[in-house]
Structures are given as C-alpha cells and as structure tokens.
Amino acid sequence: MNGKIMKFFVLSILSTLFVPPVCAIEKEASVMGASGAYELILIACCVCLLGVIALISRKLANMKKRVEKSFMTDADTGAGNLAYFENSFNTDITDEMRSRYSLLFLMIDSNYLSVYHGDDAFDRAVKYVADALKNIERKGEFSARIAENGFAFAVCTADKSSAEQRAKEMLESLNLFLGTENESNRPYFHAALYRLNHEDKNCGVLLYNLRKNCNRLQNSETQLLICDDNMMENAVQEELFIDKIEKAFEEEEFKLYLQFIVDNKTKKITFAEALSRWEDKNGDIIMPGKYLGVMERNGMITKLDYYMFERVCKQLAAWRDTEFGHVMISCNFTRVTISGKSFISKIKSIADAYDFDRKNLLIEITEDTVEHNMDVAMQNIKQMKELGFRIALDDMGSGYTSLINLCEYPLDVVKIDRDILLRIDKDNGKDLFVGIIFLAHSLNLEVVCEGVETETQNTMVSETACDYIQGWYYSRAMSIPNAEAFAREYEEKLA
C-alpha cells in the first residue's frame, strides 16, 4: 500500500506541474478500492493545494519585485528616484564607509531652458543628465532623480578634494548638453557638494539642506558650491525664516513705502519709487536686504512682485482725485516675474480691479532682465505699453545693457545708476554722465539720476539736463502716511 501511495503522490505532483496523469490516478484508485481511493483523492487535493500556494507565492514574489522596482524608479528617465536614493544611502553607506562619501545635489535651470528653448529642451536635459550620471558612476556610487529639476549623486572618494574634483568633472561633462542643436548656450546646471560626517545619517534632511544651498546659485555664473556644516545648518534656519515670510504675506505685513523723486528744474515732487518694507507684528521694520535674497532663492520673489504691484495700483486709485493725483509711482519687477508666461494676464487682472490713470504707473525693469530674457522681455514690454503703462529702465550703466537696446525697447524713462554719479566729480565721469543724458534725450527718453545724497552731488546734477533727481538728499523711503505728510510740508516750503 505504501508503495502505491507513494506512486500516486508522485503522479499528483506531476499534475501540479500541468502534466495531468488522470488515467494513472484512476488506475491506482481502482486497485486500492473505495477506501484507498478517498485517501488518494484527499492526498491529491492537498498536493494540488500546496502546488497552487507555491505558484501563487512565486507570482507574488515576482510582483513584489516589480512593484519595488517601479516604486524606486523615475518614470520619465528610468533612473532611480528619491526612494531608491534613500534606500541606497541607508544600505550602501555604512558607518565604516561614511567618511568616504560626499553628497552632490545637481539642479537643472528649468526656467531658463523652458523660456529659451521650450519644454522639450528641459525634457531632453533631464534624460541627458540621468544617462550621464549613470555612466559616470563608479564602484560604490549611486545617483537618482529626486525632484523635477534635481538629481542626487553619492560620490565615493578617499578625500574631500577628490570629491570636489569629481564634481567639477561631472559638471564639465554635463555642460556638453545643448539647449538647441548646433547652438552654444550658457551652462544650465548648478550643484552643491557636502562631505559627510560620521553623524550624518538622515538622508532626507541632508538632501533638503543641499538643495536649499544649491538654490543660492540661481541666476549666478557659479556652478559649484562647496558646503560646510554651517551652511547646512543655515539652510535649516532659512526654512524657518521662509515660514515667517509666508505668515507675513497672510498677515499683510509687507508694506508699501515711497521714495519721492523731484523735477530737476522746479524741484517739485513728480513721482515716487515703490519700495517694500516688512513691518512685523512687534512693530519692527525688516529691511529688504534680509528677505529679498531668501525669496529669490526659494521662488517667492514673484509673489512679492505682484503683491507690491497691487498695492501700487490701490494707492494710485486712492490718490486719483486728491492733491497727490499728479504723482506717478514706479514699481519694480524682477526678471523672473517678467519672464513668466502669465505675466501680462496677471498684471492686467490686478490693474483692472482699480480705477487709476495707467500713465501714472511706471514699470521698472532692470538691465539684466533685458540682457538675459531678450525675446520674452521684448514681448512683455510691448504688451505693457499697449496696456497703457510707462516703462523705465533701471540701473542704466551698471554693465549689462547694449546701447542698441535703447532703440529696440519701447522705453519712456532711463534711470542712471549711482555708480555713474559717483564719478561725476571727475572730468571723464562728468562727460559720461552728460553723454548718457544727451543720448537718452535724442531717443526721446526722460532721465532720472539715482543716489543723490549730498549737497555737492545735487549741485552738479542740477547743472545738467537731467530731468529728475532721486536720493536721500530729497527723500528717504517712507510709509504712506509719513510720505503724504512729508509731501505736504515739502511743497509748502518750496512755495
């Protein structure tokens, strides 16, 4: 009986492998009788069940592997993702090996690529970087795409200087990418590098702080930033500061301040420049130098631009039928904001909500806006003019503008940079100052001289054909109530 049962057992196993020995089972069952047949059927069912369980287990194991691979893979590039990088960090970088590793965060300048070469160029850049980093990897190293425009790379070297050299070599390799075929472009990549300490075990925090430091390189010619412990800690403090900034927007703590500008001939107040000041809940005033850089690094500067633009529109509407109805206000926009695809629709929507003469609002653009965003800036400036706003070019002479741009752009006003004014006491400096005024006037542009602070400077500028004068000699930046009180007193004295 035992031999027959064993034979049947073997046949049943074969049945689980999809070789159905039906005839053989029936034959054995007939020999063993009814009682033995039930035993055989029971054993067959158990064996079949075990086979099914084994088959399901194999399929589940394979499915798990596929899910895990999908979970750790970037769908666009096939490279690892953040989960993959963190898993590799925790498993591959042991305590014994930690001091040999550096982390590199690589950022693609997605805004520049998209503006100049379209979204397709950015997509190509992402795939290019993923493939390039994979090919660069050495034993013990790993890389991944951890953000839309960011990659992480674990560099394994004997010392810090070797890691820095590896990072430079990576950037040189990536710089071969062209935004447009057969066209040479400026580099699209920035990176931040940090050498691990024995206590650096939180991959997420390290990558976050590296990314924050890398953001400092936006709009910079510097491609590689070497981070130390203090810089990583400052990134944490900056995040706390960002939370305060967001809260300040919600509480409307950013206030409109004005610095008046006078007519050179009459010395009467003609217009004012809009400036921002942060008045916190304690009544303390935080100057722009404390928060503008943080905003720029963290993509918040556009929010401030539109925020201040709306307050200028609101103020002009409030002044429309008052003694200040003739005062124009200039409002600054950064190149990031002006390069936005929705810039025109956004400012039109804001302005339409207020009743004021749009000729009383000057939109100031900087020289680097004109230089680095030529096509987009031209299109948006023309549309701003069509909406009725006046256009002022700020910081004329600071080093970017080609003189041909003065002919091509529909400008109304140029503001001479203070660096030019500081050279006015020298013969060549005065000739340059006067020459710029003459050139602007020949193009039907009005001229503002910025940064006049002393009696001597005011006297020298007043003797020229400059149209308007701006600076502390006449007015500091003031809140709206103080500005209105100052303007009334100033005009009374002037009369």
Image (cartoon, rainbow, N blue to C red):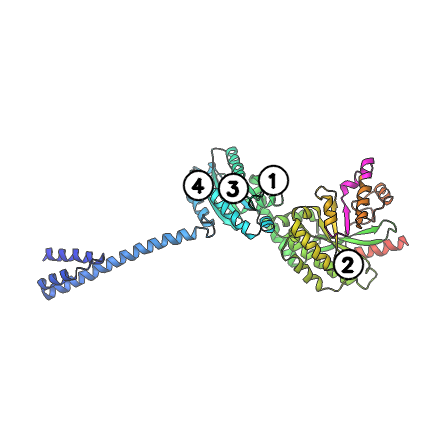
According to the picture, the residue beneath numbered tag 2 turns out to be 359
Q: Where does the magenta region start and end?
A: 409-431
- Write down the residue under mark 1: 222
Q: How far apart, in angstroms, are the residues tagged by discs 2 and 4? A: 63 Å
Magenta span includes 274: no
The mark lying in front, picked from 2 and 4, is 2
Label for residue 165?
A: none
- The residues tagged by marks 1 and 2 sit, at their Cα atoms, a distance apart of 40 Å
Whichever of callouts 1 and 3 sits on the residue coming sooner in the sequence is: 3
- Image quarter hosting the C terminus: bottom right
- Amino acid bearing label 4: Ile
Residue 93 marker: 4
Q: In the picture, which quadrant includes the N terminus? A: bottom left
Name the secondary structure under disc 3.
Answer: strand
Q: Is residue 92 visible?
A: yes
Amino acid carrying mark 1 in the image: Thr
Residue 361 position within the rendered picture, expressed as x and y whole percent measured from the top left: 76, 57
Marks 2 & 4, CB-CB < 8 Å contact: no
- Circle 3 is placed at which residue position? 104
Q: Which marked residue is nearer to the observer: mark 1 or mark 4?
A: 1
